[in-house]
Image: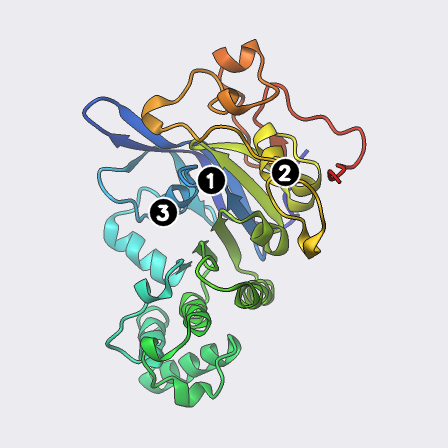
Amino acid sequence: MSDRPNRPAVLSVRDLTVEIPTRRAVLKPVDRVSFDIAEGEILGVVGESGAGKSMTGNAVIGLLDRPARISDGEVRLRGERIDDLPYEKLRRVRGRRIGMIFQDPLTSLNPLLPIGEQIAETVRTHMGVSNTEAWNRAVAALEEVGIPAARERAGSYPHEFSGGMRQRVVIALALCAEPDLVVADEPTTALDVSVQAQIIALLKRLCRERGTAVMLVTHDMGVIAEAADRVAVMYAGRMAELGPVRDVVTRPRHPYTDGLMGATPLAGGGQRRLRQIPGAMPRLTALPTGCAFHPRCPNAQGACRQDPPPTLAADHGRAACWFPVEHDLPRAREA
């Protein structure tokens, strides 16, 4: 049974595999990953550093650094395959139909151009409007993301804004061409908690109003719980669990997800003992046989050490685990 919203899929990823050839072996930082994102939906992609979440996002938008390459699977945007497009065609798709928000807004902004001109240039390039119309749309985009005195501040340079305001500018830049999809890679990591909440609320509101699909990549389960509709949990390049965020947060099925939730402080400052997942994520050069999580898993049995777990389908919420966590009652938090 599907757990996806009953809306058309904007992004469809099927069996996506990324390879990095080295002298000793071919590494797979992304291994047979599948998921969909519907109109107006935010899919959170979460995992530890090295899980493959950012590499998945980069593969979707065609920004893999060589020698990394997509070796298998496909990426479709509103039914059109984009992973095999020539570079120039894919570059036009990225600017017009896919918006990008990165962790450090200064890497997305030209320090030598006023922010209004940067947004107007994007509008002119991808929407074919006049200079005056492009400027007016740039100002409107800044107003929409909450930049005070937007018409005056449009002439300011990136360094003249705070970190939170720069991230608002980047969101305006990502959305100004009215894309179908936004890929946001750790968009709130460098911000303080209050600004994080503002940016999350802003992103949610704008995407709901526009029907834009969002792939939100983060290591922060708190951000996922606040922002996402569904969550994909990654471990060692593979999808460990996929499902509605409420189900995954309150009743995780994969032992890794259960460990992540046990290591996450309660919202609202509640008291409980945090649990630690023993060990560390394996290096790509030394992946264990069977399930990559089995050396750290409290539920591991013989099959886990010998056979890789089943691969998750894009439209089902379940765990890629031979012995998933069972929940007879709603998950209780430790006192």
Crowd class of label 2 (few under 14; some 14 to 19; many from 20; radius 10 Å): some
Relative to 80, is 157 above or below?
below
Residue denoted by label 1? 48
Q: Amino acid at mark 3?
A: Asn
Given this view, does label 2 or label 1 mark the residue nearer the observer?
2
Q: Secondary structure at mark 2?
A: helix
As drawn, the label of residue 182 is none
Residue denoted by label 3? 58
As drawn, the label of residue 262 is 2
Q: Quadrant of the C terminus?
A: top right
Crowd class of label 1 (few under 14; some 14 to 19; many from 20; radius 10 Å): some
Query: Which badge, 2 or 1, comes first in the chain's sequence?
Result: 1
> Residue 30: horizontal and vertical position, in percent?
39, 34
Crowd class of label 3 (few under 14; some 14 to 19; many from 20; radius 10 Å): some
Given this view, does label 1 or label 3 mark the residue nearer the observer?
1
Relative to 318, is 55 above or below?
below
Q: Secondary structure at mark 3?
A: helix
Q: Marks 1/3: CA distance?
A: 17 Å
Which residue shows up at 31% across the image and 25% down it?
285
Q: Amino acid at mark 2?
A: Gly
Query: Which badge, 2 or 3, comes first in the chain's sequence?
Result: 3
Q: Quadrant of the N terminus?
A: top right
Query: Which badge, 1 or 3, comes first in the chain's sequence?
Result: 1
Give 212 or 247, whichever is nearer the viewer. 247
> Residue 174: horizontal and vertical position, in percent?
42, 65
Position of residue 254 in the picture relative to residue 282 (left or right): right
Query: Residue 252 is drawn in which quadrant?
Result: top right
Callouts 1 and 3 close, C-beta under 8 Å: no
Relative to 178, is 3 above or below?
above
Which residue shows up at 55% across the image and 36% down it?
314
